[in-house]
Image (spheres, rainbow, N blue to C red):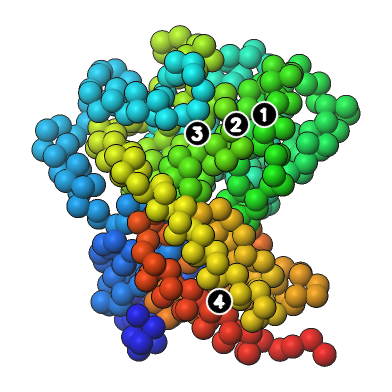
Amino acid sequence: MSQTPPSRPGPNARAWVERDAKVVSHSYTRTYPLVVQRAYGLIVEDVDGHRYLDFTSGLGTSILGHCHPDVVKAIHDQATAFIHMSGTDFYYPSQIKLAEELAKRCPGDEPKHVFFSNSGAEAIEAAIKLARYHTKRPHLISFYGGFHGRTLGALSLSASKTVHRRGFGPLLPSVSHAPYGSIEGIEALFATTVPPDEVAAIVVEPIQGEGGYVVPPPGFCRELSELCHRHGILYVADEIQSGMGRTGKFLASEHEGVVPDIVVLSKGLAAGMPLGATIAPARIMDWPPGSHANTFGGHPISCETALVALQHLDGGLIAHAAEAGTRLIAALGPLVDRSRLVGDVRGKALMVGVEIVKDQASKLSAPDARNRIIQRCFEKGLLLVGAGRSVVRFLPALVVSHDEINRAVSIFAEAVMEIDRELPRAA
Ligand SMILES: Cc1ncc(COP(=O)(O)O)c(C=O)c1O
């Protein structure tokens, strides 16, 4: 793919981007001008016929690859049966079957209930409301670097970039943030500003995503969940990015044997269709009819594709993701020695981040170099996105092959070495 002439974006993409600028909200975060025409497997084709290897999986969504035949069939079959009837007001089998499957897969022996929504942020909103409703406590705690979405409640928890928050306040009151990975940070809050018996929930990503692919110290999630339980606080695992097999287990929480009180899923849940799920023991999901609902949540088509995704996870895809991830991390690792710009390679299975730095000695963030590397990869036919200040994230579809990993790493390495040569060296 790197042999294609470097004419990306082509004339058609340029024309679409110009039209877009006139009518589409400028709040979106497009890093490069990819204008998609079609996609299949890990391949994306743009409107000029250029092909790209997609290591973003549509932002962590298309876990079976783009347009997987089983997903396309599920969409087609459901669309020809009926498209929508609102699970808020009526029943349909796919929503019930999906709730059964999710309840079965989430850790813990208690019977569970599932609340369906359309997106990650909405699923987090449901978790916030449920935690407050169930505990009758107002306060919420989340972590610096965390990202939980952009609706006002979810945004109040998010603390990864000020641009997400600037101009939108006041946000929810009674929300505090602590340093990620530090139990002492939570204890300091309890000792100084936040009485633990007023805290409804602590919301945590088992691995921080948007905040920079940060893996917490071993044992952190387990200790945090124990701390929560000692104080009657609900432990909410935001598995929107890390769930659905991405880290080599169904949930990343399972790596430490954590049984969250509330699990939040979205992104890969419906293999590319919009869906959010908030899952909790029935004992906790004790809100009455009418207290929370939405029109499109748990859409019949999304429920059908989610059932397909779960079947594939059961059919060996999680083990494949674990093995492919080990291979990806091993292939990227040597770049730390080859380029001064590569400060760290980290992550679990197919949730992998490469930290781009000014130089190995200072390890200072280098957002410009990171952006140039991502742009150069785009020009060479590899799609990647950033995270945090200075991280490149690799989150391919879970079906990624060894050959695709080798090609992606080779294009990425080429781009890193080129930018390394182009950037001035410190005197
Ligand atoms: C961990 C996490 N939580 C919440 C969200 C918000 O999801 P959405 O963009 O679907 O609202 C995201 C999205 O990137 C995420 O990564």
Note whether 17 is above or below 210 in the view shown.
Answer: below
State which tag comes first along the sequence, 3 or 2: 2
Above or below — where is 355 with respect to 292? below
Q: Residue at x 81, y 21 (%)?
A: 195
Q: Which residue is mark 4?
A: 373
Question: Dot 4 lies on which element?
Answer: helix
Q: Amino acid at mark 1?
A: Ser
Identify residue for label 3: 264
Q: Earlier in the sequence, mark 2 or mark 1?
A: 1
| Relative to 149, residue 64 above or below | below
Where is residue 159 drawn, in percent x and y?
67, 45
Label 3 vs label 2: CA separation?
Answer: 14 Å
Callouts 3 and 2 close, C-beta under 8 Å: no
CA distance for labels 2 and 1: 7 Å
Q: CA distance from mark 2 to mark 4?
A: 37 Å
Tag 2 residue: 258
| CB under 8 Å between discs 2 and 1 | yes
Q: Quadrant of residue 11?
A: bottom left
As drawn, is 27 to the left or to the right of 139? left
Which of label 1 and label 3 is nearer to you? Answer: 1
Task: Point out the frontmost of discs 2 and 1.
Answer: 2
Which sits in the foreground, 212 or 226?
Answer: 226
Q: Position of residue 111 (x, y in %)?
A: 44, 15
Q: Earlier in the sequence, mark 1 or mark 3?
A: 1
Q: Secondary structure at mark 1?
A: helix
| Residue on which the image places disc 1 | 225
141 or 324: nearer the eye?
A: 324
Residue 33 occupies which quadrant of the picture? bottom left
